[in-house]
Amino acid sequence: MVRNAEWKMRRVAVRYALLPPIMAAYLLAAFMGVAHAEGPGYFVPAPAKDDVQSKPKYECETPDAPVITLDTQSKYKQDDTQRATIDEDAEETYSEAVEPLRVYGRNLVKIANAYVKSNPKNTAAATCALTWLDAWASANAMTDMRSKQAQFNLSRALSGFALAYMQIRNAPGLENDRKRRVETWLKTLGQQLVGPMDKNKGTSGRNNHRYWAGLGAAAAGLASNDKQLARWGIDSARIGLAQITPDGTLPLEMKRGKRARDYHIFAADPLVTIAELARSQGIDLYAEHDGALQRLVNRVIASLDDPAFFEKATGTKQEDYPGDGTVPSSRIAWLEIHQSRRPSTEAEAVLSKKRPTSSSEIGGNTTLLFNGAE
């Protein structure tokens, strides 16, 4: 099916090449907008009464133990000013500390995605996801962050929590007391990000750390109906968009040397996801700063198979991807979101080889959420 879609797009592109440029661009964009399937996104609406399972069942396991306190440190060598060389001992310590958080995040979005995928809707899956969220909310999880790195871990984890909640919150039959408790908790965690980041005058107050904090805040704000928190998150993305150069790069991420390419991918992740959330507020971040976000995405896509641009710009060979040498699907899960709003043949060619794409930090299976398929 994917190959057929690609073939159709190529055939249409060739046909439109014979038309005047303006008309061709318009018609091709219209064709791609129709041809590209879309899923429900994060804001899953309440189902109609006849679209709910009469006897919903879901094997809901016991939620993972809450992580309340976190005191993580960077996994990079401290004498490396580019923060590009990993300290193996520090990485091992770091991974052990955050693994419980990662496991909970993966399991949570899996449950929320199960509700989204179900047809008719399995409200038992939604209830399970709420149970998992409420277990951590009741324990005040993630409220004792004792380092800057822990704050960064909170940003990314909170994004996943809130985006998972938004997928199930409109499911019928959920207990209002539990929902209020979860929303209050998400709001509290979001507010924990604002103060320290507003005081952060260093590089991490303007680079990907700020964008991830922005995503955590924006998602938590929308999940808890806190417009001020959501707006702070959206404005955090604008800090990044304002820095994107005409060639589609972020100067602060270029400073990462051999990891410059990967950190552009990493920075695009929260920026694109915030752009998706901003749409619900009538804000088009894609249009701001002369289409800066599109320039960044184009630069990333062009570099996935050929890092030559970044190697020339940094004077350093870029780090190879692990495994088969291609970018991990979890690293470009955000590209599925972008493709649902700004489709391109180049992005489709990348995604067709990586689907389903999934990242617990942006709500799980983005192919399901934004392409309407597994």
Image (spheres, helix red, strand yellow):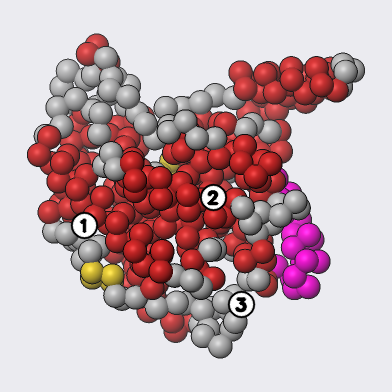
Quick one: SS at disc 1?
Answer: loop
Decide which of tag 1 and tag 3 comes sooner along the chain.
1
Q: Which residue is mark 1?
A: 64
Residue 136's place in the image compared with 357, above or below, is: below
Q: Is residue 322 left or right of residue 190?
A: right
The residue that mark 2 highlights is 238
Dot 3: element: loop
Q: Which residues are magenta?
A: 298-320
Residue 324 visible here? no
Task: From the image, state whether disc 1 or disc 2 is nearer to you.
Answer: 2
The residue sitting at 15% across, 22% down in the picture is 55
Figure quadrant of residue 130: top left
* For marks 3 and 2 on the same chain, the one whose residue lies earlier in the sequence: 3
What amino acid type is highlighted by mark number 2? Arg
**348 relative position to 129: left or right:** right
Q: Residue reaching furthest top? A: 50
Any mark on residue 82, and which? 3
